[in-house]
Image (tube, rainbow, N blue to C red):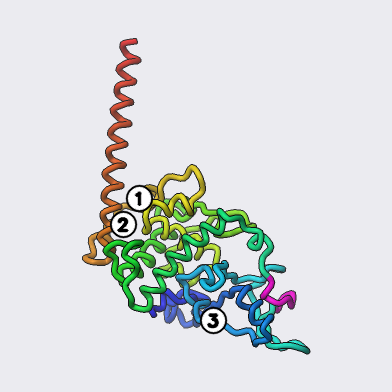
């Protein structure tokens, strides 16, 4: 597995840039339901392999959002502790509450929110398939190889978090409240970090994965993931991200799948056609006003 798809406490690209640079360590998230299962079965709490993969924002076993902070106090510092009775547990070292307690708004999530979760989980499943070196489902990702899936996730995530226009990251144009139930949608700032998924907190990671899913997958993902009234994801992507940056990836032979490149080309043609029609209508209106 490549380092940029593993969750780190700081970007792996920072290694060796300075003698005072931090050495990265694995950044571990957790599924409260997995920990609750451990506690209920009397098993010691333990870390699952998927919890350190940066391309995952949900537990695929419980179909449940992963967490990286205590639901009670918001601290990200935790430790294993053995209680007076019972097996080993993961606890928050700030408030000493066990981490198997789920966030109440997540427990009360509506069917619409869970439908959004399922759409992203299905996309994450294709990423996991690609990480294992297997060809993803061609009904979901037409003419896309495993390497192309991973490249698209890395490249598009990087484009969505970097911006030369402002400090406002393009990912903010893809609002999806279901990725953060019970929280206000934050405004993410742009960054030049080469591997944003590797060092992103869970809210940003899920937002990037949801936006990438809506861009890469078919048009039905837009309806499932994005808030009502938002333009199709591929259109928003092309309008918010520098065209030259997108073209540089398209120009690299075999980097992105033919299906994604075709969707981008078709969307650009449709956008130019709509702009031409709008200009023509404006000219007609101006002529009508002149001779009125």
Image quadrant occupied by the N terminus? bottom left
Q: Nearer the viewer, residue 182 or 119?
A: 119
Q: Residues within 10 Å of mark 1 (few under 14, many from 20)?
A: some
Residue designated by label 2? 246
Which disc is residue 72 wearing? Answer: none
In magenta segment, residue 94: yes
Numbered badge on residue 48 = 3
Q: Is residue 82 above or below residue 196?
A: below
Question: Most prominent secondary structure in the magenta stretch?
Answer: loop
- State the SS at label 1: helix
Q: For this view, does 132 lie left or right of residue 197?
A: left
Q: CA distance from mark 3 to mark 2?
A: 35 Å
Residue 85 drawn above or below residue 66: below
Circle 1 sits on which residue? 238
The residue range painted magenta reads 93-101
Residue 287 location (% of width, % of height): 30, 17
Residue 283 spot, x, y in % from top left: 30, 24
Residue beneath the point at 45% across and 52% down: 166
**Residue nearer the viewer, 132 or 253:** 132
Q: Give residue 63's quadrant in the image.
A: bottom right
Is 125 drawn above or below residue 170 in the view shown?
Answer: below
Query: Answer yes or no: do the residues labelled 1 and 2 have beta carbons within 8 Å?
Result: yes
Q: Where's the C terminus, which quadrant?
A: top left
At horizontal 48% and vertical 65% (from top left) the residue drawn is 121
Q: CA distance from mark 3 to mark 1?
A: 37 Å
State the residue at coordinates (66%, 59%): 108
């Amino acid at each position: 597995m490549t380092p940029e798809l593993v969750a780190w406490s700081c970007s792996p690209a920072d290694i060796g840039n300075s003698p005072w640079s931090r050495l990265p360590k694995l950044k571990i998230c957790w599924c409260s339901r997995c920990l609750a299962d451990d506690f209920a079965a009397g098993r010691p709490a333990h870390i699952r392999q998927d919890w350190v993969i940066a391309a995952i924002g949900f537990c695929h076993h419980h179909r449940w959002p992963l967490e990286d902070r205590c639901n009670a106090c918001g601290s990200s510092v935790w430790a294993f502790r053995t209680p007076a009775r019972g097996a080993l547990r993961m606890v928050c070292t700030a408030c000493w509450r066990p981490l198997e307690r789920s966030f109440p708004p997540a427990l009360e999530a509506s069917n619409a929110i869970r439908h959004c979760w399922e759409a992203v989980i299905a996309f994450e499943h294709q990423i996991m398939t690609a990480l294992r070196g297997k060809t993803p489902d061609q009904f979901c990702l037409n003419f896309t190889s495993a390497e192309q899936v991973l490249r698209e996730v890395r490249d598009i995530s990087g484009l969505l978090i970097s911006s030369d226009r402002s400090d406002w990251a393009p990912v903010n144009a893809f609002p999806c409240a279901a990725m953060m139930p019970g929280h206000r949608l934050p405004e993410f700032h742009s960054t030049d970090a080469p591997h944003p998924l590797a060092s992103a907190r869970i809210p940003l990671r899920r937002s990037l994965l949801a936006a990438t899913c809506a861009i890469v997958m078919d048009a039905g993902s837009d309806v499932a993931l994005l808030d009502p009234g938002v333009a199709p994801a591929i259109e928003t992507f092309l309008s918010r991200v520098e065209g030259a940056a997108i073209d540089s990836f398209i120009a690299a032979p075999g980097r992105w799948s033919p299906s994604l490149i075709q969707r981008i080309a078709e969307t650009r043609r449709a956008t130019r056609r709509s702009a031409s029609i709008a200009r023509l209508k404006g000219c007609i209106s101006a002529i009508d006003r002149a001779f009125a």
